[in-house]
Image (cartoon, rainbow, N blue to C red):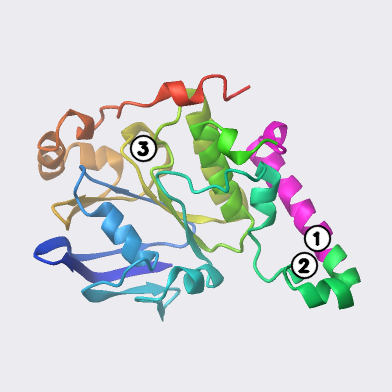
Amino acid sequence: MIRIDNVSKSFGGLQAVRGVSFEVAQGSITGLIGPNGAGKSSLFNIVAGLFPPSSGRVLLDGQDITGLPPHKLFHRGLVRTFQIPHEFSRMTVRENLMVVPPGQSGENLFKTWLRWGKVKQQDSEVLDRVDDVLKFLEITHVADELAGNLSGGQKKLLDLGRTMMTDAKMVLLDEPGAGVNRTLLGKIREAILRLNRERGYTFCVIEHDMDLISALCEPVHVMANGELIASGSMETLRQNEEVREAYLGGGASGRMGEETPRQNSTDEGASS
């Protein structure tokens, strides 16, 4: 579905990404791991259209999307989440979901006057879709809560919900487990698996939690110093000396198989 073809990116004298190539197959949950500073987020930002590569190409379903801005990629079915959620904090969870679908007739003042029947019908369809998302993610109990009041894990679930309000073909997940307690992390893991298995979503996931990557992803690609150094299953990668050296050289928080510290205090009571 996504093909990254010899992509490089330089920022002044710093080469953040160096000739990286790999594919994300349709229907897969593909992992992208590596120690801090490996170039993972820079590569994600290139694929998501936040900035163009210095060289190389990105293809979606065989179509060259290199350098297309995020809003155009959104309409082609490619969306991304961020390590720090970007919710509308003064709107409710329900309202955050309602604003996502593009081209709603109610957004046009003249259509609300002249085609009220169509606006009302479309609003009803959007609300039905919102209800489906809330139930699927098991967050109906916070539907009318301001999004800014949610815990970190609930905000990550809301991010997943917003991707469900689009016609996404490909979802880039940037550290879905960061800052999430273990209970809600389990819910996020199950939601991703169900979206993949039951609704056909394709994911590419950046994550430092190796247990989460092991539970979700096949295959997994490893970056270090801007380069792709290995690909395969987590079982295989754990035995790869080059991968182990890259992680061991990245400090305790980046070691293979060791859990990255979580900000559990942000999610106290969130699973109720």
Q: Residue placed at 74% from the left, 53% from the top?
A: 129
- CB of mark 3 within 8 Å of CB of mark 1? no
Lower sequence index among marks 3 and 1: 1
Prevailing secondary structure of the magenta residues: helix
- Label 3 belongs to which residue? 214
Q: Residue placed at 14% from the left, 37% from the top?
A: 250
x and y, in percent, of residue 206 in the image: 35, 47
> In the displayed structure, would residue 20 be above or below residue 222?
below
Q: Magenta residues?
A: 121-144
What amino acid does circle 3 point to?
Answer: Ser
Assess disc 3: are there few (<14), some (14-19) or many (≥20) residues with their C-alpha within 10 Å of its C-alpha. Answer: some
Q: Is residue 64 magenta?
A: no
- Label 2 belongs to which residue? 106
Q: CA distance from mark 2 to mark 3?
A: 43 Å
Q: Is residue 168 visible?
A: yes
- Label 1 belongs to which residue? 123
The quadrant of the image that shows the C terminus is top right
What amino acid does circle 2 point to?
Answer: Gly
Lower sequence index among marks 2 and 1: 2
Q: Residue placed at 64% from the left, 50% from the top?
A: 96
Assess disc 2: are there few (<14), some (14-19) or many (≥20) residues with their C-alpha within 10 Å of its C-alpha. Answer: some
> In the displayed structure, would residue 182 be above or below residue 22?
above
Left or right of residue 40, residue 262 in this image = right
What amino acid does circle 1 point to?
Answer: Asp
Depth check: 24 or 155 in front? 155
Left or right of residue 51, residue 238 in this image = left
Assess disc 1: are there few (<14), some (14-19) or many (≥20) residues with their C-alpha within 10 Å of its C-alpha. Answer: some
- CB of mark 2 within 8 Å of CB of mark 1? yes
x and y, in percent, of residue 152 in the image: 49, 33
Q: Is residue 127 magenta?
A: yes
The quadrant of the image that shows the N terminus is bottom left
